[in-house]
Image (cartoon, grey):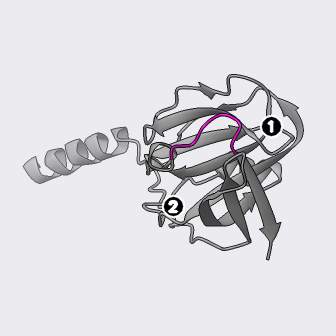
Amino acid sequence: RNILIALFALFIISCGKEKKPIVVQQEIPFTKEGTLQILKPNDSLVATLDIEFAEDDYERETGLMHRSSMQEDRGMLFIFPEEVRRSFYMKNTEIPLDIIYIGADQRIVSFSENAKPLDESSLYSQVPARYVLEVNAGLTEKWLLDIGDKIVFERD
């Protein structure tokens, strides 16, 4: 009889615990889709990057989420159909990033440096931007980027 009571108690306890599904997000690999150069206003080369493009809603929403690292010579270029003030956040983004906001004329208009991984705070462009370039945190400072520097990019 004690065994039946113990089994019944175990059944009640185990039924009360809600099982949550375990979701394992697979690492998204880098896929080179183009090349981007960052230039000073006098056209001197600052950096050349292999880039991925984020051009549709899904790609722009996913961005660099679910990646544990990125090589220093890589980045992601977000391309939007219009130039407006932009807002980004780091939800599900595991690596610290510099977020570089770029106007329709392909000149840098503002930065959000050292964005913290997994932080859901909004990071706004200071002025309207049509493009956004995400690179590893610290590169904006290393490259001595300024407002007015420009990008040029081409697809593979």
Task: Report the residue at 70% width, 62% height from top.
Answer: 36
- Which disc number belongs to residue 83? none
Q: Label 2: how many residues lie within 10 Å, few (<14), some (14-19) or many (20+)? A: few
Q: Position of residue 147 (x, y in %)?
A: 66, 34
Q: Quadrant of residue 146?
A: top right
Q: Earlier in the sequence, mark 1 or mark 2?
A: 2
Relative to 135, 45 lies left or right? right
The number of callouts visible is 2
- Report helix, strand or loop for mark 1: loop
Q: Residue flagged by tag 2: what amino acid is it?
A: Gln
Q: Is residue 148 above or below residue 31?
A: above
Q: Residue furthest left?
A: 2
Q: Residue furthest top?
A: 126
Q: Position of residue 59 (x, y in %)?
A: 74, 54
Q: Nearer the viewer, residue 71 or 122?
A: 71
Q: Quadrant of residue 68?
A: bottom left
Q: Nearer the viewer, residue 100 or 95?
A: 100
Residue under label 1, please give it.
103
Q: Position of residue 73 (x, y in %)?
A: 53, 66
Q: Quadrant of residue 88?
A: top right
Q: Label 1: how many residues lie within 10 Å, few (<14), some (14-19) or many (20+)? A: many
Residue under label 2, please give it.
25
**In the rendered view of the protein, which quadrant contains the C terminus?**
bottom right
Relative to 17, 154 lies left or right? right
Whether residue 52 is visible to the viewer of this picture, yes or no, is yes
Per the picture, the main secondary structure of the magenta-coloured stretch is loop
* Residue 117 among magenta residues: no
Relative to 101, 83 lies left or right? right
* Residue 145 among magenta residues: yes
Q: Residue flagged by tag 1: what amino acid is it?
A: Gly
Magenta extent = 144-149
